[in-house]
Image (cartoon, rainbow, N blue to C red):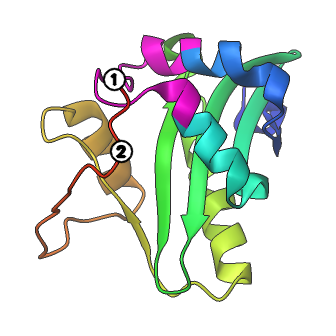
Amino acid sequence: MTDAELQLRAFQRDDAETVVALWRTCGLVVPWNDPYRDIERKLAEQPELFLVGERAARVVASVMIGYDGHRGWMNYLAVDPAEQGRGHGRRLVLEAERMLTARGCPKLNLQVRGTNAAALGFYEAIGYAPDNAVSLGKRLIADD
């Protein structure tokens, strides 16, 4: 099977349960982020940059993309483990890059947990490298 079988489309509200289950399966859900709130937040800002990938009429992949006028971001890139190795992740990243480039975005950033060796290897294989930067964060709204 090839990535050509993966059909990309914009996220729809009725995808929420399936997408959150996918994120849980892929280990992307953490206690301090409510995935349903993250979906609602994304739907309020650039909802057209929230994609799902379907194969055989089943959602098997997702990515949230954002652009703030300076940098692009990718979050929640997920591919069902049973579908991994077929090029779906690469296809989503290429589409994110295409969509951001069309908006004039000069650089795409993403964050990967340092313990996620598989994701780090995936991104390295498609041309991503660590930046000489430190990621800082401050929670403004608690999801708990």
Q: Amino acid at mark 1?
A: Asp
The CA distance from mark 2 to mark 1 is 9 Å
> How many neighbours does mark 1 have within 10 angstroms: few (below 14), some (14-19), or many (20 or more)?
few
Image spot of residue 12 (x, y percent): 84, 33
- Left or right of 109: which side holds 6? right
**Mark 2 lies on residue:** 141
Horizontal side of 89 relative to 99 (left or right) equals left
Instruction: Give left or right: position of 126 versus 94.
Output: left
Q: Specify few, some or many for label 2: CA neighbours under 10 Å numbering under 14, 14-19, or 20 or more.
A: few
| Residue 98 in picture, x, y percent from top left | 69, 70
Image: magenta residue range: 21-37
Residue 72: give x, y in percent of width and height: 50, 71
Q: Are marks 2 and 1 in contact (CB under 8 Å)?
A: no
Q: Which residue is mark 1?
A: 144
Q: Quadrant of residue 83?
A: top right
Q: Is the N terminus in the top left, top right, bottom left or bottom right quadrant?
A: top right
Residue 87 appears in the figure: no
Q: Which residue is painted at 34% across and 63% down in the image? A: 128
For the point 65% across and 38% down, the residue is 40
Image point 49% across, 39% down: which residue?
A: 76
Vertical relation: 63 (above or below) 80 = below
The numbered disc on residue 132 is none
Secondary element under disc 2, as helix, strand or loop, is: loop
Q: Is residue 28 magenta?
A: yes
Q: Is residue 44 above or below residue 25?
A: below
Does residue 129 show up magenta in the picture? no
The image position of residue 144, as x and y in percent, is 33, 23
The furthest residue to the right: 57
Q: Is residue 97 above or below residue 12?
A: below
Q: Which residue is at 57% across, 63% downward?
A: 66
